[in-house]
Image: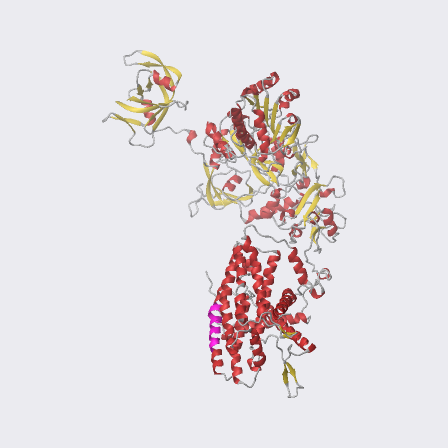
Amino acid sequence: MSATAFLLVTSLLKILGIVFVVILPMVSYSVYAERRVSALIQDRLGPNRVGPAGLFQPIADAMKFILKEDFTPAHVNKFYYWLAPCLAMVPAIMTIAVVPFGSTLFGVPMVIADINVGVLYVFAIASLGVYGIVIAGWSSNSKYPFLGGVRASSQMISYELSLGLAVIPIFLLVGQLRLTSIVRYQIENGWMIAPFLGDPTNVWKWLLTIPMFISFVVFTIAIFAETNRLPFDLPEAEQELAGGYHTEYSSMKFALFFLGEYAAMITGSAIIVTLFFGAWHLPLPWWDHPHGFHWLLIDGSLGGWRGILGGLFNIFVFFAKVAALLLIFIWVRWTLPRFRYDQLMRLGWVFFFEIALVNIFIAALIVAYMPK
Amino acid sequence: MAITVRRPNLSWSERAYLPAILSGMAITLRHLKNMLAGRTKVTMQYPEQKWDSYLPEHYRGAPALVKDERDRVRCVACQLCEFICPPRAIKIVPGEIPLGERFAKVEKYPEEFDIDMIRCIYCGMCEEVCPEQAIFLRKDYAITGLTRADMVHNKEKLIEIGGVMHGLVLKWNEQK
Amino acid sequence: MGFAYAKIELRNPRRADLRPMSVQALADSGANWSCIPEHVRLQLELEEAERREVILADGTRKSIPYVGPLEIRFENRLSFGGALVMGDQVLLGAISMEDMDVVIEPKSRKLSVNPASPNVASGFVGQTQSLQPPQTVNVQINGVWRQFPKGTRLIEACEQAGSYVPRYCYHKKLSSPGNCRMCLIEMGMPKVGPDRKPQLGPDGKPEINWMPRPQICCATDVSEGLGVRTHSPMVEECRRGVMEFLLINHPLDCPICDQAGECRLQEFSVEYGRQDSRFLENKVKKPKNIELGPRVTLDDERCILCSRCIRFSKEIAKDDVLGFVDRGSFSTLTAHPGKRLENNYSLNTVDICPVGALTSSDFRFKMRIWFLKETKSFCTSCATGCNTLIGTREDAIYRQTPRENDAVNSCWMCDYGRLNFDYLQSDRRLLEPLVRDQDRLQPATWSHALQSVAALLRPFAGWQIAILASGRMTNEELWLTARLAESLGATLIDIVPRSGPADDILLSADRNPNTSGARLLRVASESATVLQQIKESIYSGQVQALISLGENPLECGIAPEQLARLPLYIAMDLLSNNSTSYASVVLPSLGFAEKRGSMINGKGRLQRLNRAVRGPGEARDDWDILRSLIQAISGNASATSSQPAGTYTIEDVFRQMSEAVPELSGLTLSRISDLGVQVSNLDKTPGPPGEPAQEKVRERELEKHPQ
């Protein structure tokens, strides 16, 4: 088997595996989690009838979506109306391509496309997501979807700025855009969220924690805004816009929007995990090391079953981190009320943009004077 | 006259939002925790558990026609409930009790008495307005049917739900 | 004394169609009478009233005709009078000049209006008794002095003053026995000083000497200086007491009582009574559910002995069958032994009964009155046209009650008319147009039915077609019927007379409600001569096509075999009857309560029907059918889409009619008052019982409804 064919086959397997085995089930179950967690937060029970503890609820939901009448209103612009749901779903899934979701498995790196533009690719694709929403809003030819579309476009453009600026300190530190390099850097020098972990005695690392934490907060909040999650869900604001851009959609087309939103949430979490939480890296403490206490790095580099176990463990760690972040997403959603539109814009342009900008200078200064 | 509400002066930590957000999240987390630990118990698992034994005395369920101790349907078809009913769920066709019957003194009775339970809003106005203590809201709440016609309670059904009510004013007794 | 020439205008006031003549006249204050030459008389077609002897300047005497009436106009002045036909120029005499209040200016020798009163003719008149204003008296009601004409009932005066006095026995159209004691008020007369003159208070008005005990105000007329208090503590205490007494034996069966909702006892109990009963003893038992007559049911326990029904029967219905028997608490209303309350006005006793003692057997337990929507209309069962309220709920008629109109029916109506609405809800109602298809009448669409009528009528010439209109049609329908006849070229058109025994109360011998309208619109012939002609022509075979509009030809003397032999018979009716089966096309129409329109009653009063319920099925408004028929026949494109002459609504029809008929000019359907409009004085017989003559009524009505 030639190297190219091998690459093709493994890439295809990775794509199928990650999309159909991981992302889609995760999307369905994050919806389920959303419903259960929100219910628990509100002292309710949530869906608990379908299957044990309601675990088959996503299947029932999917059946329902498929069986619902797929209604296309007469007044819509048909082509764009059909195009919009695809445009909402596709970018969300495509972004996952550059995310290293594991170390190696059978010697194959667990990333679909390890490209050197890494994060830029993520931003490039993720910003296409707004087209799905804007086109949906416009082609529905109805006032609430239109308002939703307009809101979405200005909101996402505004927050992409802070999103982009927030990750610059990381690149200043790593010197590369390739995500696998960033992961490697984090394994060696401690996670971006806590650079001091790599070398607790180094004062510079402690100093570096400040801009990195600011970066993390700004980036995470901007991801909230990018994924239209509460408190930034103005484009779909049920109370004001009756669902916003997807008001006129039904059945599977609506489901695509719905899934796209959750897929975007998962990719967003995956990016956060990759950039700030060391991706698949989870050091285990090892007290019986010959040289005393040591952090044990587990990855797929070992031979035999140990390597396979290690690779699987890394994938599990990655998605466990993603799941934890998703829970935080849900938790935030069911705690905070929605911003007013002027507050949202003010927050984006007057606070986050400036904070991220200043943060770059702080990080740059630290990096410049930090001894190598 | 416009009333000017003074805006509260916020402290620095309040203006930063994040502490408030975190305390809010602590609250929701506490609720989540309590639910998981089973300390909060609010929801009733409906079809398995039922309200019946918890229903208060003043519960307003399905309206029904009651009979008195002498087995007389108390309604005299005055149609006040039909008039007061906000969703116009009640329809009555009055009839005359022929001379010689046991309760001929009452003269009037409902030939037909229909309550459309699709329309009924369980407001209890019919019970309140009834001058004869003939219609009461009972504790039935699970009113189901497969067709619209099923959901219309006719006189027989209403009497069946209503049953016999003791201790009411016996207005039409012969001495009065 | 002097001469002058003046330009005057002469006109014959009786002949509006003749143009006025403008002539140069010699004004001669030396002559008494005006003179006109013979040619003026001929022009104005003046009639000779008498001959007069005149003495000419040369002393000769001559007998010449005196003609009139002649209307003379000069500038802004006007005079009616007569003139002598004499000479060759118009001469304006002193009488006419005085009448117009014009003078001859001696200087300029010109005739001019009296400069002292240039705009209005003025002059002296002798004052006669009839011109004096009616005598009024001053009455103090609740502290306010007001004036009322002498002879006004005190209870009416109080009502006019804005303080309604509750009453049971008093009815304004009946005598006042004063037996219910509900209208008790506090009354007083002016204080008289030692000098036998009224003592004046600080405001210059007489002071009132209040009587210590209450008086009833329904049997008292106003008098000078009378003082009344309708809401003093004593009065309110008295009313509470009277209410308590009235309710002692009254059963608490409001839930089953038909009067509930319009019951005076209920209303006054709430307004003036006490909340609870102090009566612990057993109530007096009286007969219940008695058939007092074929249409009236009596419940004696509910009776409060006001005697309104007794007085109505005696005074208005002239059928004195009711009375009280027994005494005290046991007093009972009953009919005279062996008699029943079965006169044709018996249901009016139900209307005036302030409680539920007398109820209508027809309406009994049918519907509670608070559900009824009341539509102002009038009865179409005879030419009287009694004003009514039609009580309906959800497109069903439940009852008719009389509506007060002093020019037509006072407060009453007859039982026959009142109950004559059942046929509108009959099973025999025609619900859809029927067109004959191979010997069977098949349901059809309206457009098909109307086109069929037009197509079927096309082969026939005007003299082969006869139209049987109805005196039950409204003016608008009759007007369109006449237009239909015009467009067909038919001349055989008449209404079917319908008569029955009359009484001298309200019921008219003419049982068609709109004979007057049919005559006015020239659809009806005098004494049904054309109808006779139609029958003969059908018999002779001259008439080949018969259109009957709301009439059954079999009931007006046309034999079934003749009808069967007719090549074409078209029926428009609301009920199917034995003649509709012969029809080629049957057009379902609406009844009196289902449509708008106007009719003219036997006394020339134009009244309006208002729609109380919607018509059943696909039945259409009669005027709409006739309009569409005319369109279909005159071939104006498709009959349902294009409308000739802008006839879109019944208002349009009335407008066209009012433009063509002088009696109706200036009126629109909506402008007809709820009490009707007198358009011609067809009948000089007196008005409804207990009502003053027609003119008085009109004056009163003008007061109530200023134009």
- Judge whether C400 appears above or below A186 on screen: above
Query: Which residue occupies the foreground of this view, C455 or C231?
Result: C455
Query: Which residue occupies the foreground of this view, C269 or A234?
Result: A234
- The colour scheme used to paint the residues is secondary structure
Query: Which residue occupies the foreground of this view, A358 or B97?
Result: A358
Number of numbered discs on residues: 0
Name the quarter where the N terminus of chain A is drawn.
bottom right
Name the image quarter holding residue A335.
Answer: bottom right
Name the image quarter holding residue A193.
Answer: bottom right
Predominant SS of the magenta segment: helix
Q: Is residue B37 visible?
A: yes
Rendered location of residue A140, percent (x, y): 54, 55
Q: Residue furthest front?
A: A2
Q: In the picture provided, is C229 more to the left or to the right than B170?
A: left
Which residue appears at 53% of the width and 68% of the height? A123
Question: Magenta region: which residues?
Answer: A346-361
Rendered location of residue B82, percent (x, y): 65, 47
Which residue appears at 33% of the width and 17% of the height? C37
Rendered location of residue B155, percent (x, y): 72, 47
Q: Is residue A356 magenta?
A: yes
- Judge whether A243 appears above or below C40 on screen: below
- Judge whether B55 appears above or below C337 on screen: below
- Judge whether A238 appears above or below C126 on screen: below
Rendered location of residue A167, percent (x, y): 52, 73
Q: Residue furthest bottom?
A: A291
Which residue appears at 60% of the width and 56% of the height? A250
Q: Is residue B176 visible?
A: no
Q: Is residue C562 magenta?
A: no
